[in-house]
Structure formats: structure tokens, C-alpha cells
Image (cartoon, rainbow, N blue to C red):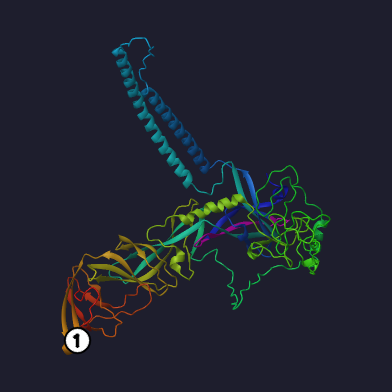
Amino acid sequence: MKSEESEGTQRWASALDAVVVYAQGALCSRVARGTVPPDGRVRVAGLPRSMDPDSLRAKVAGGDGVRVTEVRVEVDAEPAAAGTADALRREMERLREVSAAAQARRDRHEALIAEVAALRPVPPARKRDDPHRITPVDAWLRLADFVDERLTNLHRRLAELEEELRLAEHEFSIALDRWNRASTDAGPAHVDTTVCAVLTLEGSGDVELELEYGVPGAVWVPAYRLAHRQGDDSGTLVLRASVAQRTGEDWTGVRVALATADLRRRTDLPRLRSLRVGRRQTAPAPSGWREPPAGLADLFSGYDAAGPRPETGRPWAAGAGAAPVASAGPVAPPPPPPMYGMPPAAPMAAPGAAPAAFGGALPAAPQPVGAAPSGRPAARARSASLAPAAPGRAAPPPPGQAPVTAGPPRPSDAELDYAALVLNGPDVQADTRGRLFPHTPFDPVAVEYRRRAETVSALPLPGHAVRPRESAGSFDHRFDAAARADIPSDGTWHTVTVTEMPVGLRTEYLCVPALEQTTYATLVLSNATDQALLAGPVEVTVDDEFLLTAALPTLPPGGVRRMGLGPAEGIRVTRRTNLRESTSGLRGSTTVLDHQVHVELANRLARPVTVEVHEQVPVTSHAEVRIEERADWTTPPQDAGPDSLAPGTRVWRVDLPAGGSTALDGGYEIRVPAAKAIVGGNRRS
């Protein structure tokens, strides 16, 4: 059922055009076209229930001289038409009943088996003077044969019932999974709730409207595909994204953009507090209270002179977008919440006291006998209801009410949350119009939709995947997809191809023979574009053949990083060490530990390669310990990047031809005082 006002408002169809997926949540853009009606009021339907009503924005994308003067959110409820989700639900419920019936049949059969198995021959009771009777053996045997035959048949039937139950439970689990994985774009059974944007336009002619709103329940992680050919110094990197959304609407044929920014980032500014030295003093909290402006009641005189609004027959709950409430007549407005900047209404007025008007002069609290007046103006005193008091003693506050303090009203934390305050319109009580009140959730159904949408943030990530906020660091990036995409609202991962970009690369080989005598293949990637490459899984293809899936590190614009590809069996490495210990100096006062390192490399590949060999030289901060190197290795730069090497690392870079080999010799001497020794012993490789 719709109100008369909504029935008379022109409805425009809309289509989802673009979506920007952030690290958490998404910003959707919907387009509607039509001709501005004479009254300028338009309803645009199709918005999801999980949307944030405070994020709705509207603008005119096409139309000269037309502008949007008002936009608000309303919810409509209509009988739902049978669809795919409804059919899946009915099938799931039918199979649930079939499974429950099979379970009941199996349970009844087990009970029957227990009854038959409990059959035992019971001899008649013998009186005290009766002699012992001889039990006929044939009767015992016939009973035992009957029980055995009956149990054999019952167990055979039980096996059939258990197989039927297993199949029924299997079919029910499949139907339940299909129903759970179905798109959440479908509303609840029997009722379709549609969120509409009610706009007021000023102007005339054909116009194109663009509505923008935020929704929770959308996440994404980057993924890549790297293709290159051996011997080339460049490759092609295809940026893809795994996107999951449960916003309540299917994204069909939309322009997708991916951003690493936080849609709900903080906007409050830091505030430095003073440092007090001496006796502790509690810093006064800002009251946030202001005198109401003069002439506030006259602001709505024209609205009151127009008379009451026509009765629609279906009152709405307070708050924009609230669900309709069935009622036979007008509903009295609920008591207003505590107003920002003014004291809450007292639960019970004192005898003989006049009710206090919001924003007007507040009556002073009754003074107990023997107490002096506070001397503060009545307009700045806080009203309270006091019980009769004994002479000379102030009355205690009512139960559940804070003690009365003199001075201006002090609002609560909720009333000081300026971002959550809303301005009351002309349709509320006359003494609360035009004032700020704390905003509370108005639609519990929409809250449940948003809670259900947030469950996608707990999805397990694909292999090697990293959250965008973790890999982007302190910078924000945006990636626009080259083509439109379809992403259903089922809460599972879907792959979207974003763009293709060239990258510079070269193949190098790395070995650390002191730890492992194995050579590893690596790709040195360089990003020459103006967009960052975030960390994530990359599928490497060499000469049109899939090689492996590796973890791509974060690569900023202009950055160079190394990515491992696994062991290279075609390059062999061998390492041998020799240690000689001797003394030198006057009377042998210095111990000399001469370490010699011999590394052999052999290239069994059909192409030349570049191998980087890492060795470790001890480092010391002791003044009496000296280290002297004897090798042609180089010292890498000590930077603070993620690929920085440990202090003491030395590097050999060797170019090996196809089928070639080479030998590398190096070493170092450690000179320590003879009276000292290295922890763990001097003799080590």
C-alpha cells in the first residue's frame, strides 16, 4: 500500500552505472532519465536496503536550467513476485521436510528394533508351595528363532532407511548451499522492500539525474598475470582484482573502479591538551550549549498557517526512510529524545510548577528550607523535580536521575557527537522544531541488511593475497577497469580484469651457498608507470606456458623489486671452506683465524645467465677485534627498503655463458686477542 502522496509522485526507472570499490565498502552511482513533472517531485526506485541513507547525493548530469533542491530516502513495501531465489527457497524447504520425514522413519524403525530385541521368555510366577516346573525347550527355541528372523528383516530395512536418509540429507545440503549462495539482491519472501529516493527538481524539460550512495559489504584484493618471453627485457602485466560483494544488489554491466582508500576514514582533528604541573585539576569539558536563536518559533509560522497535512492513512515512523506502520488512525508523536544543548525533560514536575518550554526560561528548582538561593539567572538553571524534603536538608534526586548541578546544561557524549546530530523538521512537536537532536537508527531491517553485508570482510583471502590497506601503506591509489563487468551479490570472490600495463624485467639467478647449495631463479621487475603495483598473487607465464603462481611485492612508481621463481636445476653450485688458526704479534698475543671460501658455479642451460652469489663476512663493534677481507666481492648498499641485505653481506655477480663454469675464491681474517675467544668456538665455517 502506498500513500496518496507517493501515488501521485512520478516514478523514474534507474540503472546502476558505476561502482567504486574501496578497501571496505563501495560508492555506487545510479542514473535515471525523464521529464521534469509540473510539481517537480520524482521518485527514483531501485536503491538497496543496505545503503547508508546519510550518504545519498543527487546531481543533474544533463539538463539546462534544472537543479535538485531536495532529496530524501523512503522505503516502499510490495508483494514479492516469484523469482529464482523464491524457487530455491521452496525447493530447500521441500527437501528439508523430506529429510526430516526420512529421519523420523529411521528413528521409528530403530525403536521397533529395540522393542523386538528386548523380547525375552518370562516364566509365570510360582507360588510358595508349587513345585518347580520344567520349561519346554521348544518354546524357548521358537521364540529365539522368531526374534532372530524378525531382527534380520528389520536390520535389512534399517539399512535401506539409512541409505534413504543419507541421500535426502545430501540433496538437502546441496539445496541449502544453492540457496545460501544465491544472490542477496532478492528480498525476503512474500514482500519486496524497495528503497526510493524522493527528489524535488526545479526547472523543466528532459533531464538526466545521477544518484550517488555508499553501501557496506564490498571488498577487493589485487591479482596479476605476468607474461614474458625468455631473452626479452620487458613483459606484460595484466592487473586483475578479486571482488566480493553482498550489498544486496547485483552489479550488472557496471563500470568498476578499485581504490585503496578507506571510505570511513576519520575526519576529526587532533587536539593538544594543556600540561598542568601542581595540584591535579579536572579540565572542564566543553558544554556545547548555546542559547536558542531569537525568533525560532516564527520560522514555522507560514507552515502552521497552511493547515494540517492531508491524512495519508498510513503514518510513518519518525526518521527518513522508516518502514511503514499499519494503523487505523493518527498516531501521537513519540516523546522527543534529549535535545542537543538543552536539558532533558524531567520525568515528573514538581507540584504547582509550570512546564518548561524548550529554549525558554527554565523554572528554578524549589529551594529547601534553610537553603540560600543560588543567585543564578533562571534561564541558565537546570530544572529538576524534587521530592518533599525535610527542613534544612536538600531532597535527593529521583531514582535513576543524576544529581542536579547549577550552571548551564551539560549535554551527554551522544549530544556532543556533532556528525550524528540531525535537525528536526516542521512535522515534529512545535517546541522541538528547528533544533538538533542525536540521530538514532530508524530502520532495524536496514540495520540487519547492513550487518549481513559486512560478513564479506571475514572471507578467507586467496593464496598470496594481501589487503589493499596493508600493501598500499600511507598512499591511496585508484585503478579504473577498462571494460564493464558483472559482479553478483553472492558474497564470493569474482575475478575482474582491470587493465594491462608494461613492466621492465630481467631474469637473474641468486644463490646463498653458505645456507643452501641451490640456485634460485628470480625476476627483477621495474615499474615505469605512474601507478603503484600492490602486493598480491601473480601467475607467471613464460613463452606462453604457465610456470607458477608467486607473490608479487608492492612496487611503487619507479620502483625495482625482486620476485622469486623457485629453484633452477640447470645451474649447479658447490661451496668449500677452510679455516687455519695461528698466532701473531709479540709473544703470540693475537689469534689469527684465516677463513678461505671456494665457490664453483656451472651453467647447464642453453642460454647465458647472470648469477648473484651472496656470502657473509662477520661484523664487529669491539675495538680489539679486527676483520680483514681478501676477495674481489662487493659490498651492497645498505638501504632501508624491503630488499635490503643484512650487514656484512658480500655479493659476487658472475655472467656465465651457456655450458660454462667458473670458480670464485675469497676469504677474510679475524684477529682477536689471544686471551679471548669467539662465543661458540673459534673453529667454524
Residue 645 % position (x, y): 32, 75
Residue 316 % position (x, y): 70, 49
Residue ranking furthest to the front: 129
The kind of residue tagged 1 is Ser
Q: Please report the residue visible at 51 percent of the width from the left and 43 percent of the height from the top.
A: 84
Where, quadrant-wise, is the N terminus in this rendering?
A: top right
Q: Quadrant of residue 111?
A: top left
Which stretch appears magenta?
A: 20-41
Q: Nearer the viewer, residue 372 or 374?
A: 372
Residue 658 % position (x, y): 19, 71
Q: Is residue 659 left or right of residue 193?
A: left
Where, quadrant-wise, is the C terminus in this rendering?
A: bottom left
- For disc 1, the marked residue is 589
Q: Is residue 476 left or right of residue 643?
A: right
Q: Nearer the viewer, residue 455 or 431?
A: 431
Q: Please report the residue visible at 33 percent of the width from the left and 10 percent of the height from the top.
A: 131
Residue 256 % position (x, y): 50, 60
Q: Quadrant of residue 346?
A: bottom right
Q: Quadrant of residue 496?
A: bottom left
Q: Nearer the viewer, residue 270 or 222?
A: 270
Residue ranking furthest to the bottom: 586
Q: Is residue 35 magenta?
A: yes
The answer to whether residue 290 is above or below residue 652 is above
Q: Is residue 333 left or right of residue 282?
A: right
Q: Please report the residue visible at 60 percent of the width from the left and 45 percent of the height from the top.
A: 192
* Residue 255 is at least partly visible in this image: yes
Q: Is residue 486 left or right of residue 349?
A: left
> Which type of secondary structure does the marked residue at label 1 adopt?
loop
* Residue 48 is at least partly visible in this image: no
Dot 1 crowding, Cα within 10 Å, few <14, some 14–19, many 20+: few
Q: Is residue 26 magenta?
A: yes
